Image (spheres, rainbow, N blue to C red):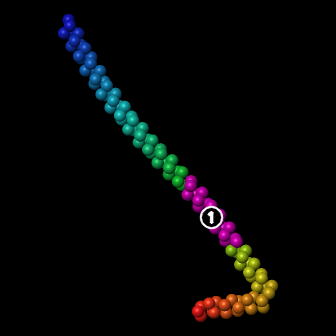
Amino acid sequence: MESKSAQDDYTQVKQDLQSLREDMAKLTKTVSEGQKSSINSLRDEIRRESLDALGQVRQKGDEALGRAKDAGDRAVHDVENRIEERPFLSIILMFLAGVLVGKLFDR
């Protein structure tokens, strides 16, 4: 009787070990797939956030460029108005600026 009981116990332990191996294989596969899924999700999230940040930077850059262009246009318009208001004074100032620059380059 005892040998049959020991044989049954041995068979049961053997089956339990096989079952444990299968469970470990399933668990390993599940963890591996979960990590791949997590990595893919993280990569997608990083890509999405990078594109959002790039869009915001591009928008702010366009706005700054627009403001700079507007400021430049206003400055040119102001200079044109001053030249139109005092053309003779503008010619004299340009002549004096040319003489000054000429003297600086002579040295």
Give me the residue at 59% from left, 61% from top: 58
Measuring from the top left, give residue 102's x and y in whole percent: 63, 92
* Residue type (three-letter) at the residue carrying disc 1: Asp
Is the residue 55 above or below the residue 70 in the image?
A: above
Q: Quadrant of the C terminus?
A: bottom right
Give me the residue at 77% from left, 81% from top: 81
Measuring from the top left, give residue 54's x and y in whole percent: 55, 57
Q: Which residues are magenta?
A: 52-71
Give me the residue at 77% from left, 82% from top: 82
**Count of number-bearing discs:** 1
Say left or right for 91 vs 11.
right
Question: Looking at this view, is 103 or 75 the one in front?
Answer: 103
**Can you identify the residue that label 1 sits on?**
62
| Residue 21: quarter of image | top left
Residue 102 sits inside the magenta stretch? no
Q: Residues within 10 Å of mark 1 (few under 14, many from 20)?
A: few
